[in-house]
Image (spheres, rainbow, N blue to C red):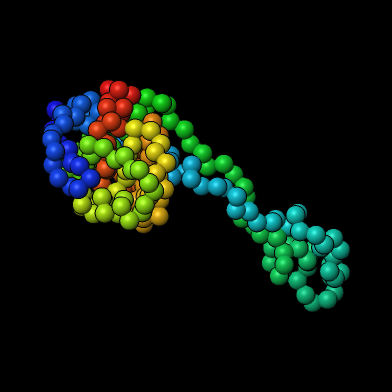
Amino acid sequence: MPKVAVYNSDGQVVGEIDLNDKVFGADVNEALLHQAIVMYQANFRQGTSATKTRGLISGGGRKPWRQKGTGRARQGSTRAPQWRGGGTVFGPSPRDYRQTMPKKARQAALRSALSAKTAAGEVIVLEDLAMEEAKTKIMARVLGNLNAGKALIVTPVVQTNVTLSARNIPGVGLSPADSLNAYKVLVHDKLVITRAAVQRLEEALA
């Protein structure tokens, strides 16, 4: 059972916590992690890029010159691909890149991501992260005390002051425990998670 230190907002160790083996000490399934990351990245794509084929461009209905006798190559339309202003051949068209995975596979990928971070010593457990007011300076100081630069902050639920305090810090992400996924965990260098969020994750994933 992994055991990690618990810190306060000043970066001081105030205790230890035993993490659940099934969530933070599971075997890392690299193939499943790869599948999950590809899925999340594909789902970010809008799929709105488009070009016009010759059938979508106005004009070009008349043959530009007669078929024979001019010495020039035969042409049927000024909207053919070889003409300036003509249609595009095999260009992109709007499409849906969305991929899906079963819920249990997504949960297994999250367990693998959390276990990999724990094994690498990149999980920082906070006793609490209650903020009375939204101040970016205060949040930056807390992360500096924890030596967590490009970090993902995980809270048990959405905390408005924490969100407002951290959203303008470059490289820092936020996520409530219920919305955590493997991509969010792996794309950040450190995982700063409150004790209450650890309990919530263990209840959901163990």
Q: Quick one: 81 or 149, which is closer to the camera?
A: 149
Vertically, is 27 above or below 41? above
Quadrant where the N terminus sits is top left
Q: Is residue 205 visible?
A: no
Vertically, is 201 above or below 173? above
Q: Residue furthest bottom?
A: 71
Which residue is at 51% across, 39% downward?
A: 98
Measured as percent of width and height from the top left, residue 79 is found at 76, 63
In the rendered view, does 157 fall on the left or right side of 129?
Answer: right
Q: Quick one: 160 or 193, which is closer to the camera?
A: 160
Quadrant where the C terminus sits is top left
Measured as percent of width and height from the top left, residue 25 is found at 19, 31
Which residue is at 30% across, 22% downward?
A: 203
Q: Residue 13 is drawn in which quadrant?
A: top left
Q: Residue furthest front?
A: 132
Q: Quick one: 168 or 95, which is closer to the camera?
A: 168
Measured as percent of width and height from the top left, residue 47 is found at 57, 47
Q: Quick one: 185 or 81, which is closer to the camera?
A: 185
Measured as percent of width and height from the top left, residue 124 is found at 21, 42
Which residue is at 36% across, 57% downward?
A: 170
Q: Residue 36 is drawn in which quadrant?
A: top left
In the rendered view, does 6 fall on the left or right side of 82?
Answer: left
Which residue is at 33% across, 24% downward?
A: 204
Q: Is residue 141 visible?
A: yes
